């Protein structure tokens, strides 16, 4: 019985790898820009994953790089289509990125930099 179960598990792992499927413990934390805005209170203080396109970059502000990310979700009229991300890494406008970051609400950096929602301490990858 054990070897049959072990064989079935190994077959499932092989099938998932060969089809490109990836199992991850935190898949539930992958969000769209619009979902992050809609769930910002619940997500505050959590690290989430996001994929999107860089539409604006401002480097070296207060020791951080600020990137604006869009993924096609949300609407410009509602203001939930673009999210600001801070990171020690940087990217170029047009880059498609995978981002892991901390959701922060009501962040006041001072000097007029007040963000009702921002993703901080981001790790960027292509």
Image: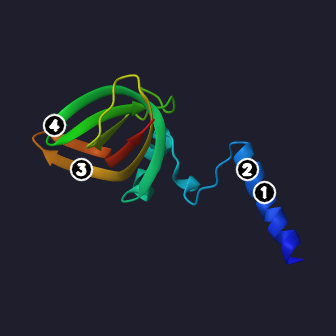
Mark 4 to mark 3 CA distance (whole Å): 15 Å
Residue 52: tell me if it is visible: yes
Tell me if label 1 and label 2 are in contact, CB under 8 Å.
yes
Question: Residue at 32% of width from left, 52% of height from top?
Answer: 104
Colour basis: rainbow
Q: Answer with left or right where residue 17 lies relative to residue 57.
A: right
Q: How far from the left and from the top, in percent, is residue 13?
A: 73, 56
Judge whether 8 appears above or below 74 on screen: below
| Mark 4 surroundings: few (<14), some (14-19) or many (≥20) residues within 10 A | few
Mark 1 to mark 4 CA distance (whole Å): 48 Å
Mark 3 to mark 2 CA distance (whole Å): 41 Å
Residue indicated by mark 4? 61
Between discs 4 and 2, the one toward the N terminus: 2
Tell me if label 3 and label 2 are in contact, CB under 8 Å.
no
Residue indicated by mark 2? 16
Mark 1 to mark 3 CA distance (whole Å): 44 Å
Q: Nearer the viewer, residue 82 or 76?
A: 82
Between discs 4 and 3, the one toward the N terminus: 4
Q: From this viewpoint, which residue is outermost toward the bottom? A: 1
Task: Give the structural element (helix, strand or loop) at label 4.
Answer: strand
Mark 4 to mark 2 CA distance (whole Å): 43 Å
Question: Residue at 38% of width from left, 28% of height from top?
Answer: 54
Between discs 3 and 2, the one toward the N terminus: 2
Mark closer to the observer (3, 2):
2
Q: How far from the left and from the top, in percent, is residue 108?
A: 19, 48
């Amino acid at each position: 019985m054990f070897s049959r179960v072990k064989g079935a598990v190994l077959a499932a792992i092989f099938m998932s790898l060969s089809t490109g499927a990836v199992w991850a413990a935190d898949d539930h934390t992958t969000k769209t820009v619009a979902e992050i805005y809609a769930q910002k209170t619940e997500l505050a203080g959590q690290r989430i994953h996001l994929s999107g396109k860089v539409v604006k970059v401002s480097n070296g502000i207060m020791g951080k790089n600020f990137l604006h990310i869009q993924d096609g979700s949300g609407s410009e009229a509602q203001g939930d289509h673009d999210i600001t991300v801070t990171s020690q890494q940087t990217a170029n406008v047009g880059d498609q990125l995978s981002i892991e970051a901390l959701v922060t609400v009501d962040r006041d950096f001072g000097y007029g930099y007040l963000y009702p929602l921002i993703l901080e301490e981001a790790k960027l990858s292509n």
